[in-house]
Image (cartoon, helix red, strand yellow):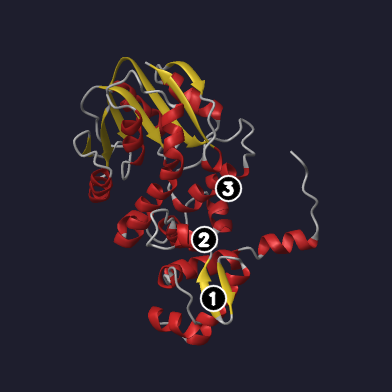
Amino acid sequence: MNQVKIHPGYLMEMSGSFWKTCTLHAGVKLDVFTVIGRKKMSADSVADLTDTNEDGMTRLLDALSSMQLLKKEDGLYSNVSGGFDFLSKDSPGYIGYMIMHHQDIFSHWGHLDEAVKSGKNVREEPVWEDDRKRENFLMGMFNIASAVAPAVADAFDLSNETRLLDLGGGPGTYAIHFCRKNPQLNAVVYDLPGTKPFAEKTIERFSMSDRIKFVEGDFVTDDIEGTYDAAWLSHILHSSKLTQCIEIIRKAVSALKPGGIIGIHEFILKNRMDGPEFCALFSLNMLVGTESGRAYSEKQIVGMLDECGVKNIERIDFSGVNDSGIICGRT
C-alpha cells in the first residue's frame, strides 16, 4: 500500500469532508432530486415544492451543482444521470434510504472521543425504536444488498441445497437472489417482528412469496426451529461481542442437517486489524452505535466457526461492496 503524503491541505480536506456529507444528506432529506426529476427547474420552484427558504435552497442547489450531483444551466437545475438513477425516489436504483440511515447515525460520530474514552456507545436511542429510522435502516440494507446480492449468489454455491435459513435476513434480499439463482431452493428469512412488513413487501415484489417465508424471532435469545441444508449469516455478527457471535453461529449450525453449509458475510478485517480502511472505520461505527458490536478479522471468524464444530472452513474468492467477504464451511 502506498504511503499517503500528509500535509496541511490533505488534513484540512479530510477534516472538512463532513461539509459534503451534510450537503448530500440535506439534498436527499429534502427530496431535491426527486422533485427535480427529469425536468429543469429554477431554485424558487424547487423551494416552493419542498417548502423551504428560497435563498437557502439556492445555496444548497449551487453546492450540489459544485459537487456535480446536479447540473446548472441558465439559472435552471437538472439531475445528472447518476443523480437521478440513485437519488430520486422515482428510480428503481434509489439508495436514499441508506444515505438517510447515515444521517440518522451522524450525531453519534460527533461523540467518538467519548465512546473511545468509555468503551461504550453514545447513541441517543436505538435506531430500531423509531419507525422512520427503522425504515431507513432496513430499506438501506436492501439498497446495499441489492447491489452485491447477484454476485454473492454466484459465489456462494447453493445449487445442491433445497432449504435455506437466512438468519437476520432483514428485507430478504439475499434469500430472494439465492432463490432466483437456484430454482430448486426454498428459504426462510428469520428476523425480528418489526422487519416482517418490509420483508414480505420485498419478497412479494420479486414474486417469491411461494418460495420464501418470514419467521419472527430473535436469534440472540430464541432457538431456531426446523432443519436446513444451508444457513446464511450476512452482516449480523458485527452487532455482537465475540462470545455472542459464537452462540449465534452455534444456533445456526444446530439447525443444519449433517453436511450442511454455513456462510458468513461480513466486512472482514485483516488479521492485523488495521485495514481495509472501511472495515476499520466500520468497527468504530459499531463502537459509537451498539452495545458490543465490532468488525472481526478473518482469523476471528474462522475461530468462531471452528469453535462450533464447522469443518472445511475457507474464504471464498469474493470481494463485495466496501471489502465485504464470505467465509464458509460445512457441518
- Between the residue at mark 2 and the residue at mark 3, the CA separation in whole angstroms equals 30 Å
Q: Secondary structure at mark 2?
A: helix
Question: At label 2, which amino acid type do we have?
Answer: Ser
Rendering coords of residue 309 (x, y %):
40, 16
Q: Identify the mark nearer the N-term, 1 or 2.
A: 1
- Quarter of the image for residue 153 reads top left
Q: Secondary structure at mark 1?
A: helix
- Between the residue at mark 3 and the residue at mark 1, the CA separation in whole angstroms equals 30 Å
Q: Identify the mark nearer the N-term, 3 or 1.
A: 1
User: Tags 2 and 3 in contact by the CB under 8 Å rule?
Assistant: no
Q: Identify the mark nearer the N-term, 2 or 3.
A: 2
Which one is in front in this view, the residue at disc 1 or the one at disc 2? 2
Query: Dot 2: few (<14), some (14–19), or many (≥20) neighbours within 10 Å?
Result: few
Query: Dot 3: few (<14), some (14–19), or many (≥20) neighbours within 10 Å?
Result: some
The one of 263 and 298 positioned closer to us in this rendering: 263
Query: Dot 1: few (<14), some (14–19), or many (≥20) neighbours within 10 Å?
Result: many
In the image, residue 254 above or below residue 44: above
Which one is in front in this view, the residue at disc 3 or the one at disc 1? 1
* Residue 81: mark in rendering: 2
Residue lying at the far left in this picture: please name it.
210
Please tell me which residue is depicted at 55% across the width and 48% down the height of the picture: 284
Q: Give the total of numbered labels.
A: 3
- Quarter of the image for residue 189 reads top left
Rendering coords of residue 221 (x, y %):
28, 37
Which one is in front in this view, the residue at disc 2 or the one at disc 3? 2
Rendering coords of residue 103 (x, y %):
46, 62
Q: Which residue is mark 1?
A: 61
Q: Which residue is mark 3?
A: 281
Question: At label 1, which amino acid type do we have?
Answer: Leu
